[in-house]
Image: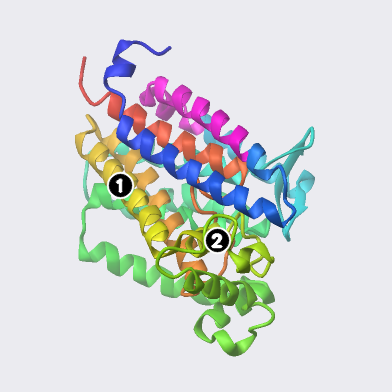
Amino acid sequence: MFGMRALTEFDYLLFGTSLMLALLGVLGIYSAATQGSSGTFVRQLFWIVLGVVVCLVVASIDYHFLADHALLFYCCSIALLVGILFFGTEINGSKSWLVVGGVQFQPSEITKLVVILALAQYLGELSETRLSRRNYVTLSVITLVPAFLIVLQGDLGTALMYLPVVAGMTMVVTGLRMRFFVGVLMFSLLIAPIAWFSLKDYQKQRILVTFDPELDPQGIGYQARQSQIAIGSGGLLGKGVGQGLQSKLGFVPEVHTDFIFALLAEETGLVGASLILMLYLLVLTRLIYIAEVARDRVGILIVTGVASLMFFHVMVNVGMTLGVLPAVGIPLPLLSYGGSSTLTTFAALGLALNVFQRRFVY
């Protein structure tokens, strides 16, 4: 499975940077474990090891084979998402979890990669650069069907991540045309009222609190407020690993998952937080490079989808911790605790490594 070409054409910089981010996440989770969540960092280490294995396996399978079977993967994912609505387990207000043998897994995470493959396969077969209305309808169906099912599960944050993916991949085909941006703006304005009235009350409150932090500082706005305090108290060099009072005393809820950036910023300061963001920038820069050297449109589209997903995950999560975006439950890739997120991120990186290894025609 892993031949000489896999070793010589392997992108060690992307893989090493990603692994470094994952280990920094373990450091933060270890620090959070002092709050009584003992054992979480050991489980996260297990997920990282398994994620590395998944990454290498995905990288070893020709991405053309994966794209050719995207329809099958897509149908299986949709069936699984529908099944979750009836047989899923509700955790933290979201019925999006499948529990098997005590192990929790979130199918909506891996569906992101399935959608990327499906979009890459569809867009890759188009010869023209101007998309017709029929093309846009097809793209909308591929993206919005799983997104709608995930919204029904109560996981609005994950559903939103499908939109930047399809937008980024569509731009690869159509280019940066004003018509595209006008279309996106008009579409957003049309669905905004529908989306607003379909939100639950607490989801509306999260959005309103983002614009007015004093609206409910001890309720819906508590997480973001405490997160900002934790980040600000870290100063230049931080308080040291395990010494962050805001996180150590439990003032920041879900600190080892959605708000791990606040924990690391408090304990490592501006220097540590900047290092983390620079590592993410390096990952994204490397993904862009891989997209540039990919040998065909399908490869370009796959890596563009992965890069779009990574970028918006980081942007939304860090925006949440800084209080400039609503808290919608988006994990920070590789750093946040969670098996589903960790495995999905490593699988996504495996797709990018896959494209890089096959950038030359043999």
Relative height, residue 313 to residue 339 (above, below): below
Q: Is residue 179 left or right of residue 109?
A: left
User: Which tag, 1 or 2, sits closer to the chain's start?
Assistant: 2
Q: Is residue 28 magenta?
A: no
Q: Is residue 48 magenta?
A: yes
Q: Which residues are magenta?
A: 44-71
- Element class at badge 2: helix
- Element class at badge 1: helix
Residue 230 location, quadrant: bottom right
How packed mark 1 is, by other alpha carbons closer than 10 Å (few <14, some 14-19, many 20 or more), is some
For the residues labelled 1 and 2, the Cα–Cα distance comes to 22 Å
Residue marked by disc 2: 263
Residue 42 location, quadrant: top right
Relative height, residue 271 to residue 38 (above, below): below
How packed mark 2 is, by other alpha carbons closer than 10 Å (few <14, some 14-19, many 20 or more), is many
Relative height, residue 312 to residue 252 (above, below): above
Q: Name the residue rendered at 57%, 29% in the picture.
A: 50
Asked whether residue 194 is in view, the answer is no
Q: Amino acid at mark 1?
A: Leu
The secondary structure that most of the magenta stretch takes on is: helix
Q: Which mark is residue 282?
A: 1
Considering the image in quadrants, where does the N terminus appear? top left
Asked whether residue 83 is in view, the answer is yes
Give the image location of residue 39, x and y in percent. Answer: 71, 42
Q: Amino acid at mark 2?
A: Leu
Q: Is residue 83 left or right of residue 18?
A: right
Considering the image in quadrants, where does the C terminus appear? top left
Q: Disc 1 vs disc 2: which is toward the camera? A: 2
